[in-house]
Amino acid sequence: MAQWSAGSIAQPGTIPVIPLRELMPWALFGGLLMLLLIYFVGAEQGATSLIHGRAIHEFVHDGRHLLGFPCH
């Protein structure tokens, strides 16, 4: 039968420590994802459009107004 040491189980009310080396790739991924989302909501139209057509603009139209981005 396996034995557990008292130090290996998190105590109630304590905050687990996550090393920065393990957190940094996820933080970078989340930051890049947020920048991409802000681009599509805020700037994907007209001269700066990466995708031809109005599909992206129409998909994020209400969110654009909700966040205060002008679009027309």
Image (spheres, helix red, strand yellow):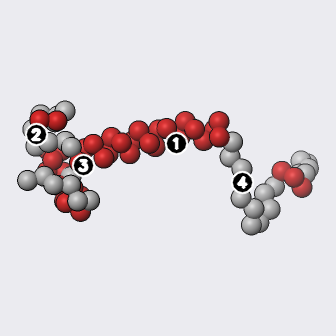
Task: Say which element carries label 1.
Answer: helix
Task: Say which element carries label 4.
Answer: loop
Q: Is residue 14 positioned above or below 21 on the image?
A: below
- The disc at residue 41 is 3
Counting residues from the start of the chain, the first of labels 1 and 2 encountered is 1
Task: Say which element carries label 2.
Answer: helix
The amino acid on which the numbered mark 3 sits, given as a three-letter code, is Val
Residue at the image position 13 percent from the left and 52 percent from the top: 71
Residue at the image position 16 percent from the left and 36 percent from the top: 49
- Quarter-of-image position of residue 43: top left
- Please give the residue where the numbered disc 2 appears in the rendered image: 46
Instruction: Tell me the distance, in whole angstroms, between the alpha carbons under discs 2 and 3.
Output: 13 Å
Counting residues from the start of the chain, the first of labels 1 and 4 encountered is 4
- Please give the residue where the numbered disc 4 appears in the rendered image: 16
Q: Residues within 10 Å of mark 3 (few under 14, many from 20)?
A: many
Q: Residues within 10 Å of mark 1 (few under 14, many from 20)?
A: few
Q: Left or right? Give the position of 23 relative to 4.
A: left
Counting residues from the start of the chain, the first of labels 4 and 2 encountered is 4
Residue 15: image location, x then y, percent: 71, 58
Counting residues from the start of the chain, the first of labels 3 and 4 encountered is 4
- Which-is-in-front pick, marks 4 and 2? 2
Q: Is residue 34 positioned above or below 6 on the image?
A: above
- Please give the residue where the numbered disc 1 appears in the rendered image: 27
Q: Residues within 10 Å of mark 2 (few under 14, many from 20)?
A: few
Instruction: Tell me the distance, in whole angstroms, between the alpha carbons under discs 3 and 4.
Output: 35 Å
- The disc at residue 44 is none
The amino acid on which the numbered mark 4 sits, given as a three-letter code, is Pro
Counting residues from the start of the chain, the first of labels 1 and 3 encountered is 1
